[in-house]
Image (cartoon, grey):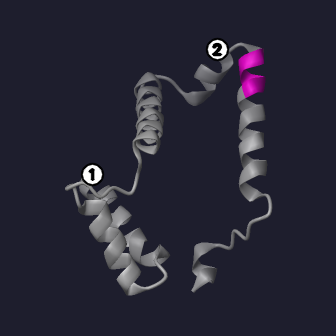
Amino acid sequence: MLVTFFLVCITWVFFRARSLDGAWTLLHDMLDLRGASLLYVRQFTFVSLITAAVLALHFYLREKTLEEAWRKLPVWSQGLMLGLMLLGIVLNIAGADHAFIYFQF
């Protein structure tokens, strides 16, 4: 499963790059561990925390359904989460062209 994920991440570079040279440069930067990094320390920390939270949630929900876990949350917590999701959706779609990827070729 990890190999498949790795290969999918690599192939997405070719879909999103503006040119073949740009794709090769991005792949080189992604795989170069000698110092050049795509993420700064602050961004890396943020991504690592989000990844850890998602993994913790995954292991917490292994023996439960999402509906069971949702029902156990206090109402104020449910409202806060729904509000944050709605805010994220609004901020993400405001003012930008988000054409489906296959229409961008």
Q: Are marks 1 and 2 in contact (CB under 8 Å)?
A: no
Q: Where 105 sits versus 3, above or below?
A: below
Report which residue position mark 1 lands on: 2
Q: Where 99 sits versus 94, above or below?
A: below
Question: Which residues lie in the magenta part?
Answer: 76-80
Report which residue position mark 2 lands on: 72
Q: Quadrant of the C terminus?
A: bottom right
Residue at the outermost left position: 34
Give the camera-side residue of 8 and 84: 84
- Residue located at (42% from left, 26% from top): 56
Disc sitting over residue 77 in the figure: none
Give percent across and percent down for residue 48: 40, 37
- Residue located at (77% from left, 41% from top): 86
Q: Quadrant of residue 3?
A: bottom left
Q: Is 53 included in the stretch rendered in magenta?
A: no
Give percent across and percent down for residue 79: 78, 25
Say which element carries label 1.
helix
- Mark 2: give few (<14), some (14-19) or many (20+) Cα within 10 Å: few
Q: Is residue 1 visible?
A: no
Say which element carries label 2.
helix
**Residue type for callout 1:** Leu
Give percent across and percent down for residue 78: 73, 23
Give percent across and percent down for residue 18: 49, 82
**Residue type for callout 2:** Lys
- Residue located at (31% from left, 69% from top): 27
Q: Where 60 sits versus 88, above or below?
A: above
Q: Main secondary structure of the magenta part?
A: helix
Q: Where 16 sits versus 65, above or below?
A: below
Q: In this rendering, would 64 be left or right of 41?
A: right
Q: Is residue 47 visible?
A: yes
Find the distance from the CA under tag 1 to the CA under tag 2. 32 Å
